[in-house]
Every structure is written in C-alpha cells, then in structure tokens.
Amino acid sequence: MKDGPYAPATAAACALIVFLWVLHRFSVQRKNTLGFRLPPGPFAWPIIGNLNQLKRLPHRDLHELGKKYGPIMMLKLGSVRTVVVSSSPMAKEFLKTQDNVFASRPRTAAGKYIAYNFKDLIFAPYGAYWRHMRKLCVVELLNTKRIQSFSCVREEEILLATRSVWEMSGQGRKLVNLTNMISSFVQAVMWRILSGRTISFHCDTNSEEIKKMGKEVSATVGAVNIGDFIPYLDWLDLQGVNRRMKKVHNSFDQVIRKIIEEHQQRRREFHKESATKDIIDVLLEIGKLNGREITEENIKAIVFDIFIGGIETTSTSIDWAMSAILKNPGVAKKMQEEIDSVVGRERTVSERDVASMEYVQCVVKETLRLYPAAPLLLPHESIQDCTIGGFFIPERNRLIVNAWAIGRDPSLWEDPLAFKPERFMGKNVDIVRDRDYFDILPFGAGRRGCPGAAMAVVTMNLLLAQFIHCFEWSVEGDLDMTEVFGSTTPRSVELLARPSLRLSTCP
C-alpha cells in the first residue's frame, strides 16, 4: 500500500507532538530532581492533558481523583498547569496564607467577550485596576448600610412572590414550578436594586428576554471552552462558545446602555434625590473614586457582575434549600416552630425577624455546605513561584478549589452526606465575615471572596422563612437531587411542589 501525499506531513506532526510531550516530561522530572517538588497527579496525555478525565460533573470527578492523589494535586488541562485543592487546611494555605500570590485570574474568553474585556471585578486580573473596582464595590455599593437600604425592595418582592405562588397553584390545587418562581423572584429583586425598574416575570415581555439573557450568560461562562485550555485552537472557536458570548454580550450591553441613558436623563431633569437609590444612581453620583473617573463601561461591567453573579448563585442556592427542606419534613417542622415563636401566625416575616431565627440561618449554612452553587470556585492564577505544603507551585499556575469536596469531607463533618442544620446550632459560625473559617467556601475567600455574599445570605434567609411560614408544602414521589454542571450547579430537574396555606390569609 502506497503512502498518501500527506503522509510525510502527518508523520512530522506526530513526531513533533511526541517531542513536545517528552520535553515536558523531562522538564517536570528535572524540576523534581532540582528540589522543585511538584504536587502529585495523574498521567497527562499530549495536547489534551487531563481534560478527558473531566466529564459531566467535574467537581465529582476531581473529588475522586483527590481521593487517590491527595488534597493538593497537579493536573494539565490542555496546556494549562492546574493545582486542585480539596481540603480545608490546604484551601486556607492558598486563599489566606498565600492569598497575595493567588489573587489573580487567568485570561479567559468569558472575561474578554462578556465582561467588557476584563473591565469587571470577577474576571479582571490582579492589579491597580482590580483594587480600584473592588474598593468601589465593597465601600460604596455593597456595604452593610447599602444592603440594609434595599430591605424594603426584598420584602415587597417576597410578598409579590408569595401571592404569585398561591395564585399559580390555583389556591393549593396544582403543583407550582418553584424553580422558576425562585429564579423570577431573585431576578426581580436584583433588577430593582440595580436599575430601579419593577418588572413582573409573569406578564412582562421584556422580562422573558432578560431571563433568557441570564441563562445564556450562565451557560457560556460555565462551558468548558477548549480555547481557554488549548490557546492555539482558540481562533477556531470549535464549540461556537465565543460567538455565543459575543452575541449575549451585545444584547446585555444594549439593555444596560439604555437604562444608564434613562438615569442620566432623569438626573438632568430632576435634581431631587430619591429616598432609595439604585446601584446605577450611586455610580453616576459618585462620578470619581480616588481621582479615577467611573466611566460608562465601568458601570456596565459592575452591573454585569452583580446581575449575573447575584442572580444565578442566589436562586440556585434557594432552590437547593427548598429541595432539601421538602426532602426532610422534620427540618420544615423545626423551622415553622421557630418562625411561629418569633412572628406568630397573624403576620408575615420581616427582615428584622430573621436575626432571631437561629435554626433558619443554620438551614442556609447547611445548604451552602452540602450544595454550594459554585462547587468549583472561579479559578485563580499565581503571580509568582511559591511553595505550599512542601510542593513547588510555578508562576502562572491555575488554582481550582473544590468547595463541594470540602463541604463533604468526612474528616470535617460527621455524617457528611446528611442534611442536618442542627450541626451549626450554638456555634456562631459566620460564613460571610469569618476570615479564618474554611470548612465551607460557598463565596470563596481572601481578596477574591465574593463582595455580595452578605446580600445573598440575607435574601436566602428571608425567602425561605417566608415560604415555610406561609405554606405547608408537599411533593409527588421522590425528589431527584442530582445536579448539572455550569457556572452554577443547579438541580437536574425543576422543583415542583404543592402549597397549602398555614396562615389565616394569603399576603
């Protein structure tokens, strides 16, 4: 059989691949010989590395690999060196002790095509610009006073959501799609906080576009984009992810630009300050921070972060919490007993009431332990060489923290797979502000910790307390508690439940 015309080229390409792989293995062996001991890990194939070992649920795949190679292991995802951490002590080493080394982000397609070319807070690399943006968010936008100022928004939207649940159930005769209801509620709250707009997610045609836009952003950001791991293939956009990102970015940009223009017009026409300013109002009013002008692009990037980050993680976490409560009727009963003791049966729950509901807060903590919305925290990147746990971590090495594995670590948690809010009773665990607590990491930690964590927890506490106080819930058959992977990890099937009134009247 004769060789085809492309045989020499094919042979040369194969030889080059083998040569590069041998060179890489020699480099790794040489570093280990010289005392630069790299973390252990599985065999990495040429070109793809260990990408073939990550399937539908990467957090579970990495958990299984961690059982074999330890709480700190090295993978090659395509051509990208990646350290995976899956224990609380190791997470503390990386995210606190060496926080300054791992405070950056890798440059990915999502940051480039969706997040205004790394102009936001989530995807921006570590540096002066990122510090400026974080200060703006933490000091001006998401401080305790500002979060409290939006309490009336949350309470009003929760009352609307409660009424909608009762109406859509046909006064308790039909199942309600709680997954959709929870997502609609969180989006309505966040949209009012960001833009001041009140939208109905049941009859507003624009709201459907906003929901689709949010889902598309989540799907593309959470996709395993080959170009992020094999950069020389990025220009091909083999999966079409980059094209989808550009399209959804343009849609989002048009919506936000129009809202900013409306706010600017309103500021020119009316000089009176409103009692409750939305986030865009605050940003336009500030104008500058530390001498740096806050541009329209800065505003759009911040709104993108809060809108996407706040909606997806919060709604996914509430959905998991309601699922866990309905699967464990004893938990619902204890919640109702506590809420009744604080609120009674004649009125609904207010945000002030929640501070006296320890068990309700423990339900939220247990949910975030067992079902973190982002099981693999957004990747970090090292800005210099360092040594952790006796292992050498090179510069520009990615870091993935498996928060899902840490929350289910049997060395930390007794009966780790059971949903037991009681494990937090009397322990005064603050998962938002305690910088030394690494046994649960739903919001990350260190410099890259989520600045909106407090708002998310407040919203979760209030909605769960209200839904469990107002209604008795029932489901048909066994609840499917499996998940799907993306930028967040929602349930694989939507949550359907039937409400019946506990209170004398519906709000």
Image (tube, rainbow, N blue to C red):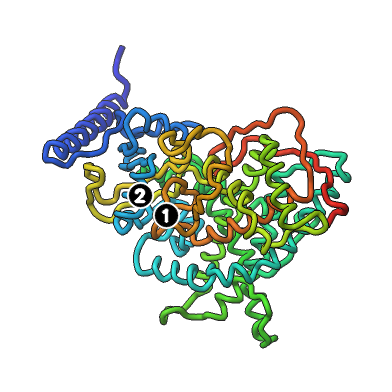
Dividing the picture into quadrants, the one containing residue 74 is top left
Q: Is residue 44 above or below residue 155?
A: above
Residue identified by numbered label 2? 92
Dividing the picture into quadrants, the one containing residue 192 is bottom right
The image shows residue 380 at horizontal and vertical percentages of: 37, 51
Q: Is residue 72 above or below residue 252?
A: above
Q: Earlier in the sequence, mark 1 or mark 2?
A: 2
Cα–Cα gap, marks 1 and 2: 9 Å
Q: Is residue 42 above or below residue 431?
A: above
Residue nearer the viewer, 495 or 25: 495
Mark 2 and mark 1 in contact (Cβ < 8 Å)?
yes
The quarter of the rendered structure image containing the N terminus is top left
The quarter of the rendered structure image containing the C terminus is bottom right
- Image point (27%, 34%), residue name: 40
Left or right relative to 307: residue 30? left
Left or right relative to 431: residue 107? left
SS category of the residue bearing label 1: loop
SS category of the residue bearing label 2: helix
Left or right relative to 75: residue 238? right
Type of residue at label 1?
Ala
Type of residue at label 2?
Lys
Residue identified by numbered label 1? 445
The image shows residue 488 at horizontal and vertical percentages of: 55, 45
Residue nearer the viewer, 354 or 463: 354
Disc 1 packing (10 Å; few <14; some 14–19; many ≥20): many
